[in-house]
Image (tube, helix red, strand yellow):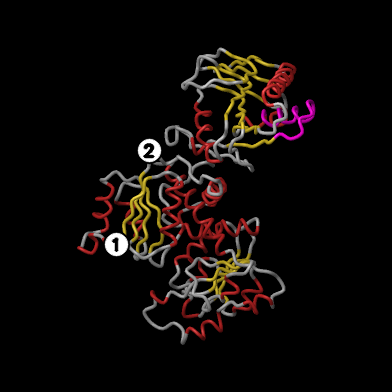
Amino acid sequence: MSQKVLLSSKEIHIILHRLACQLIENHLDFKNTVLIGIQPRGVFLAERLSKILKEDYKVKDVALGYLDITFYRDDFRRGEKPLEANKTNINFLVEDKKVVFIDDVLYTGRSIRAALTAIQSFGRPSEIELLTLIDRRFSRHLPIQPDYRGRQVDAINQEKVKVLWEENDGEDVVYLVNN
Amino acid sequence: MSELSVDHLLGIKYLKEEDIQLIFETADHFKEVINRPIKKVPSLRDITIANMFFENSTRTKLSFELAEKRLSADVVNFSASQSSVAKGETLIDTVNNILSMKVDMVVMRHPNPGAGVFLSRHVNASIVNAGDGTHEHPTQALLDSYSIRERLGDVAGKNVVIVGDILHSRVALSNIFALKLQGANVKVCGPKTLIPKYITSLGVEVETNLRAALEWCDVANMLRVQNERMDISYFPTTREYTQQFGVNKKILDSLDKEITIMHPGPINRGVEITSDVADSKQAIILNQVENGVAVRMAVIYLLASKIKQ
């Protein structure tokens, strides 16, 4: 197994600020916008962005929720391992809101497909956008593309993209792992 | 642990402590789901479940059916009174006929103890016991423990007394297994005629004085007197039973702590508990009913995830 650094802590820092600015460009004061972190790994990115928006760009109020997609996945009973659920925490209605899905890596697009179904249980959003830190292009199974992307990566299927966060893993870094 | 150690839910007796914790953690997620504006997930789209009730039930049947529908399973219902059982068909034949219509899971209530175990050995489907005679009622015990955990934070170390007709109660037996497995202290309380002789071999204590039992406990689970299962008289009159083993507001207020009151339903108001107790803040009877759907969703989801494609 070998791994190489795709993004260093400094690069992640710059990219997060750029993504925050792009969000502000489209959503201004976030009055009608909600950020939804996709469980489990999208939550760290969503929390980080919401913090940057509040602290560095003085956006007053950013609604942030977590969405677990386990019960909406299309591979129930198909994998080796059983699916483990995580906590969903959305204490607002998304009816007529602009929703931004936030996830760390966009790969096949199946998680986002599940998230699109799952979010409907909380109302009918006026629109849904997608933000991902890493976009693995050429590996999509479904016609899903991000609206905001941190870095585009050409990775082959055996390779894995690993995103680590300081608050959970001790450092901010993105690896490309080759098995 | 992310998988149950069993392929069927036949009784608490066959579960491990980790199974119970996994069911509770999964039920937490489903409890959140059933409180959403849209209370349904598509997980079990390709699973068909037969609810086979050879004995009357409203609450349990409704709760199972709701749980199955909230998981998007296809559901067929069967009740013995309108079936070929009345024409003399055997249990295995009845179930196999239903299974040949491609059913993946059977939820069964049956008047004979062990009916679920028997079925699991002879038919190729996941079996959930929804009550087998006076033997076990595992999902009721799970939702009772889940409700205690929700109200008191934990089941381990809590003092729980089960009051009433222990002899005929599958709820009592499943509860004893579940509570002991999770490290709770359990006493049973009721007329001596309604307490089985060997109950202490399960690690529970017998208390015949209701007041002493209530003073000791954190939770009192009040059972219904099952007149329909009684072949002989076990106590002189209902009035005498109520005087000795009925819980009323007066006795609760005279305790120096606020205990939690549970009841698996259906309540005989004025017999085992009075109306003011059943409707008080101390009673979590309706929470039990709500949790029943979440816990049954968890059980069905976890069992279904073990059914091979």
In front of the other: A64 or B110: A64
Numbered mark located on residue B308 in the image? 2
User: Where is residue B11 shown, x and y percent of the image?
Assistant: 44, 57
Q: Is residue B9 magenta?
A: no
| Relative height, residue A164 to residue B227 (above, below) | above
Q: Is residue B82 above or below residue A160?
A: below
Name the kind of residue labelled 2 in the image: Lys
Disc 1: which residue = B80
Q: Which residues are magenta?
A: A45-62
- In which chain is the residue bearing label 2? B
Instruction: Using the image, name the chain to which the residue with label 1 belongs.
Output: B
| Residue at horizontal 69 percent and vertical 20 percent from the top | A22
Crowd tier of the residue under label 2, counting other residues whose Cα lies within 10 Å: few below 14, some 14–19, many 20 or above:
few
Residue at 50% x, 56% y is B292
Q: Residue at x 55, y 50 (%)?
A: B24
Give the mark, 1 or 2, whose residue is nearer the N terminus. Answer: 1
| B155 horizontally vs B114: left or right | right
**Which quadrant of the view contains residue A12?**
top right
Looking at numbered disc 1 in the image, what kind of residue is underneath it? Answer: Ala
| The N terminus of chain A - image quarter | top right
Both marks 1 and 2 on one chain = yes
Residue furthest top in the image: A154
Q: What element does badge 2 sit on?
A: loop
Q: Is residue A43 above or below residue B39?
A: above
x then y, percent, for residue A73: 48, 34
User: Callout 1 environment at 10 Å: few (<14), some (14 to 19), or many (20+)?
Assistant: some
Label 1 residue SS: helix
Q: Main secondary structure of the magenta part?
A: helix
Which corner quadrant of the image does residue A44 belong to?
Answer: top right
A49 drawn magenta:
yes
